[in-house]
Image: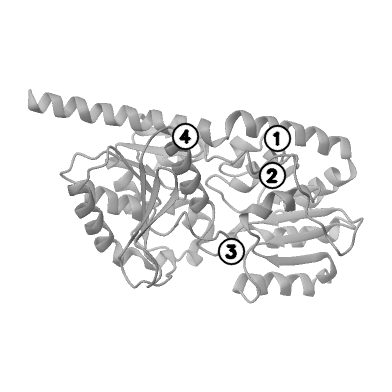
Amino acid sequence: MVSEHADPLAAVGGVDAGGQNVHVAGLSAALAALGHEITVYTRRTGPDGPATRVMAPGVTVEHVPAGPPAPLPKDELLPHMPAFAAHLARRWAVDRPDVAHAHFWMSGMASLTAANGLGVPVVQTFHALGTVKRRWQGAADTSPANRAAVERHIGRHAAAVIATCSDEAEELAAIGVPGDRIRVVPCGVDLDLFRPDGPIARHAEQDGQARVLSIGRLVPRKGVDTIIEALPHVPGAQLIVAGGEPGDEEWLRLRGLASASGLAPRVRLIGSVARADVPALMRSVQVVVAVPWYEPFGMVPVEAMACGVPVVASSVGGHLDTVAGCGVLVPPRRARLLARALGELLTRPELRASLAAAGVRRARSSYGWPHVAAQTESVYRALAGERTDRLAAAEG
């Protein structure tokens, strides 16, 4: 596994630490449980600590010296990818992997460079596409200027590209990725951690109010401001916002928006929550809301569904696969429509119960990590088999 900026050992909740970190950690552990040996290569972000750490049985995380040993925004990592690729090439020349699975576009760039001449098939998962990001963020997009071109190159040269949802598969085809190389395999959820039964977080303030939860990275595209804008039209509801830290730019912006709207008593920004505590927090609310402008997959709705909590999500990206039919979809950045959906759910307990049950069934049937790992393994085995056939033909 190559995950240049998303360390599976990192705490989740920062600007650049979110679903990809969770995905790489969960997939690696699940593949190791099937008997595979996994090394995760991620960039070193601190001067201290060991170069390698065991994350789980069969999974080792190797911190690659590429650029300064300090945290950097992911959009500033491109100049350090040649050093990252060189490290991979040295390691793989000595101990060649059967498959390299790159996560995010810069990982794909480094992996293809390192694998060149070694016969290592590269599988690519983008997690987000530059064309989609630029479409929604426009001039606010801080990605390197050549990102879209590099993604097209990766998509056309990787042995396989795993899309996490059907919408992403269509986006990949639109940028010229050959259809026979695209496989759809979703992200997964830890069904032992995220489940309907278990502890429920206690709320000392405003007991008796309906509670709505937004949880994830605090960046503008996640659409938390849309939820705040909807709140005046959802009488009596309290919004809990988990993610980020007090003093962060987006945290301050959202707090200012709530205050300016007279909603400060009804909006609680609680900062990051330890991953082990997330299920209890989800089970303590009536609805989980995830309304980003765009979303390559969206792990929060699936985690909420697995906990038996109804979900309102924006009708974008992975939500079209995961939430459709067992939750409520609304257009992104449409506060009035979001308010209408929340109002209906909060006043109809029987509807919440029905959606909750449907969400649990969907999460358990389609998104458990063993199921996702088995699908991913089938992609790997096909490519490893192709490589074996090519080598045998060459030797013959």
Q: Which mark is residue 304?
A: 2
Disc 4 target residue: 373
Q: Is residue 211 above or below residue 173?
A: below
Q: Quadrant of residue 250?
A: bottom right
State which mark lies toward you, 2 or 4.
4
State which mark lies toward you, 3 or 1.
1
Count neighbours of disc 3 (C-alpha within 10 A) and say few if under 14, some if 14 to 19, many if 20 or more: some
How far from the left and from the top, in percent, is residue 306? 68, 39
For the C terminus, the image quarter is top left
State which mark lies toward you, 3 or 4.
4
Disc 3 target residue: 219
Mark 4 and mark 1: Cα distance apart in space: 21 Å
Q: Are marks 3 and 2 in contact (CB under 8 Å)?
A: no
How far from the left and from the top, in percent, is residue 281? 74, 53
Between residue 226 and residue 31, name the one nearer to us.
31
Going by the numbered disc 2, the residue's amino acid type is Ala
Q: Residue furthest left?
A: 396
Mark 2 and mark 1: Cα distance apart in space: 8 Å
x 61%, y 74%: residue: 248
Q: Are marks 2 and 1 in contact (CB under 8 Å)?
A: yes
x 60%, y 63%: residue: 220
